[in-house]
Every structure is written in C-alpha cells, then in structure tokens.
Image (cartoon, rainbow, N blue to C red):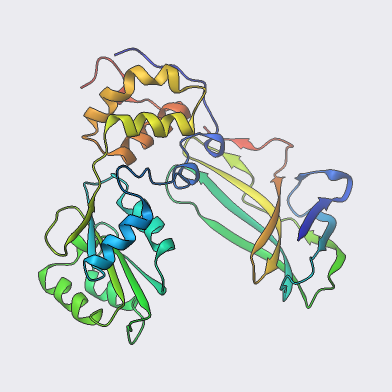
Amino acid sequence: MVLTLQTKDGGIWFKPADLVEGRASWHIDYGEEVDSIELRLFWYTSGKGSQDVGIVRVLRDDSPDPSGHRDFSIRAPEGPYSFSGKLITLSWAIELVALPSGETERLDLRIGPQPVEVDIA
Amino acid sequence: MSAVVVSRHRPANNPFASHRVEGLAFRFKGIGPEALRRRLDDLGGRAAIVGPEGSGKTTLLEELARTLPGQSVWVRLGAGCHRPWHTARTQLPSPVSTKHTVLIDGAEQLGHLGWHRFLFATRRAGRLVTTLHRSGRLPTLIECRPDHHLLRALVEELAPTEAPHLAPDLDDLFRRRNGNIRLCLRDLFDLFAGRSKPIFDPKSG
C-alpha cells in the first residue's frame, strides 16, 4: 500500500483559520483489505512524560477505489499554536490512515502567526 | 564527576523523549522470549516479573504479551491508584475465560484482599502475568536486575553521538538513582533540555 500526502505548493506553515489545502493519494495492493480511508488533522505532544493527542477534524472516504486521490481543504484551528517549551513540544499534523490496518502517512504542519514554532523555553 | 555540556534540544528532538524511550526493546540477558514463554507454561501459566522501579518490568511484560497466544487483557494500575480493585475490575472482561491472557501492571497497588479478589476474578484465565516489586504473590518468572552496563547500552542506542561524552558520568548517575533506569533517562532528558540538573552537578550529592 502506498499513501501520500501533500499540501498545495508544499507549504507546511499555516496561520490560524487558514485553509489547509492539498491532495491525499493512495494505492492499495491486490489482496489488501481497506474499508475506508481517513484524513485527520490533529495535534500531539512529545517530550517528557506521557504523550497526548487530540484529533480535531476527520474526513472519511468509505469503500475507496484501489487507486485514487482526494483533494482536501481543512480550516486550520485558531490554536494552540505549534510550540516548544522545555518539557514538551506541541505539534500539528495531518495524517492519512487506511482502516482497518491503521497504515499511516503523516505530514507535520506548523500552525501559528509566524513561520517558526513558538519558543516558550 | 566531570561537568557534562550538551546543546539544548527541543523536546520533540530530545533523544531521551518519552516516545523514544518507550520504543526501546527489552534487553534479554541469559534467557530469550521463547524460553520465557515456555517457563511460564511450566509454572502453570501464572507468574510474576519481579524487579525494582524503573527496571524494565513493563517493557518486558509488553514484549512477552506479543509472544503469548490468546486474547491479551491489560490491567494497568498506576502508582497512587485511588480504588485499585475497582479500577482493576473495570478493565477485566466479563466473564474472564481460558482464551484470555491477563497482564497486570502495578499489582502491588492491590492490597491483600484486592489481590485475592483479583485472583478469584481471573481464575479461569488461560494465563496471568503480573509485574511486582517483590516476589511472593505468584511464582517468579524472571527478576529484572538493571545494572550500569544496561544504562550505558540504552544511552548508546538513544544518543550515539553524545554517549561517549556522557559515559564517565553514567555510573554515578545510576548509583545516585539507586538503579532506577527510568529516572536516569529522565535526568538525561533534562540535561538535553537545558534544565538545571543537580544530578550532573559535581557539587551536588
């Protein structure tokens, strides 16, 4: 299975409430079971301690063709901005997930007023 | 002890970030996963992984679970669990049957009565494996005894470039943390995060 994700123009920085536009593509090999394909916009933390994650938008395609693509347009959230402190980094990402196998392709985004993540360390 | 200086890493790129530490495989010494599984069967399918805090018991339990047949049922009781028996019971299927392999992490949270209730509730489980700080509640499957060689090996895996610079201090860190590998790795996270780290301060301790 091949899953690919790309944003329009390849950009990864989006201001709050911007439209995140791009294309999700997939190729399902013969014999692989795929009931649906999901595109998720989510945040996650990494660093010290347990990781947290929150999914804020989901676009779902049931019974996808073996090979296909879908152009997407998702409104970027107002917040929180992408940031790094001393203990955790909060990152935004979109991922393309094939279900039920859970095979995933992820593209990290940066959401905030500036093109660099907020440094609160 | 030498003063260790490393450049500050953002948390997501810290070599000792939790998602990297949790991805470490258990380092088997003297006995492999298959031999361990056979030993569990020899013990009647009920046994304990024994070791002090931060010695890799949970990591081993997770790896062992992958080699065991049957449907895994995880019961996780964190330190300071308010109502451990109630918490454990809500994580068990009803009824527990021979197709289930019950894995309980943090069984010492259950008191004497809670433990016996738990044993009764899981009496029909195909297998029951627990982690414990001390032996006694179930036959000991294996004892986890971390040493400074293990800490060095894990640091080399997580931070291969910096490991040679850290090596002189790791034995001392291991000793100060009483062999708790988890705490050692958290201290190393702090060091790489640029947080003040008395454990690496030659004047401390």
Q: Is residue A46 above or below residue A34?
A: above
Q: Look at the image and tell me whether residue B83 can be seen.
A: no
Instruction: Give the quarter of the image for residue B64.
Output: bottom left
- Residue B186 at x, y percent in the picture: 37, 37
- Is there any visible trace of residue B37 in the rendered image? yes
Residue at 33% over, 41% down: B182
Q: Residue at x 48, y 47 (%)?
A: B23
Q: Left or right of B2: which side holds B138?
A: left
Q: Is residue A117 left or right of residue B35?
A: right
Residue B108 is left or right of residue B41, and the answer is: left
Answer above or below: position of B81 versus B155: below
Q: Residue furthest top?
A: B2
Where on the picture, by quarter, is residue B171? top left
Name the one closer to the observer, B198 or A70. A70
Image quadrant in which the N terminus of chain A is located: bottom right
Residue A60 x/y as whole percent: 75, 72
Find the residue positioned furthest to the bottom: B95
B104 relative to B194 in the view: left or right: left
Q: Where residue B72 sits in the image (x, y, percent)?
A: 40, 71
Q: Front-most of A65 and A113? A: A65
Residue at x 35%, y 25% (from the top left corner):
B197
Labels in figure, total: 0
**Which residue is drawn at the image coordinates 72% and 42% (left, top)?**
A113
Foreground of the two, B75 or B41: B41
